[in-house]
Amino acid sequence: MKKTKTQGSFFNIADILSDFKSDEDKYITYEFQKYGYELARELGDLKNRSLYIKLAKETPRGLLEAARNFVKDAKNVKSKPRLFMWKLNQLKKEKK
């Protein structure tokens, strides 16, 4: 399902609730928690999911998406989490 943005980088609550899986997402109450968890799962780093949830809460979503897409496009990556963090730090430096 395509999620529609409402204001800024937030999504429509109806779209989020339609994707909610009660058996898997029972401890997730905010959208940024779901985003951080999905990011950790995509990078194969679930043991550090709290780090990605914190990043999702405090970091602009555009920077996270740019770093996420960079990792998706990369081939023969030894460590997706390391590449993600490197690119995210690089993007933060460029923004300043």
Image: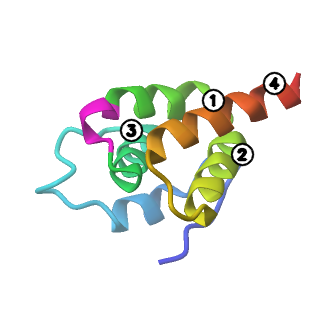
Q: Is residue 52 left or right of residue 49?
A: right
Asked if residue 85 can be seen in this view, the reply is yes
- Residue at x-position 31% and y-position 38%: 29
Residue 23: in magenta span: no
Q: Looking at the picture, how far across and down is residue 1, in whole percent?
A: 47, 78
Kind of residue sitting beneath label 4: Lys
Residue 79, quarter of picture? top left
Magenta residues (range): 45-49
Q: Which residue is mark 4?
A: 93
Kind of residue sitting beneath label 2: Gly
Q: Which mark is residue 33?
A: 3
Kind of residue sitting beneath label 3: Gln
52 to 24, vertically: above or below: above
Q: CA distance from mark 3 to mark 4?
A: 25 Å
Query: Circle 3: is it few (<14), some (14-19), or many (20+) Cα within 10 Å?
Result: many
Q: CA distance from mark 2 to mark 3?
A: 16 Å
Q: Which mark is residue 62?
A: 2
User: Does label 4 or label 1 sit earlier along the sequence?
Assistant: 1
Q: Which mark is residue 59?
A: 1
| Outermost residue toward the left in this view | 23
Asked if the residue at tag 3 contacts the one at tag 2, i.e. Cβ–Cβ closer than 8 Å, the answer is no
Quadrant including the C terminus: top right
User: Does label 2 or label 3 sit earlier along the sequence?
Assistant: 3
Q: Which mark is residue 37?
A: none
Determine the secondary structure under disc 2.
helix
Q: Is residue 60 left or right of residue 82?
A: right
Determine the secondary structure under disc 1.
loop
Mark 2 or 3: the one toward you:
2
Mark 3 or 4: the one toward you:
4
- Residue at x-position 34% and y-position 27%: 50
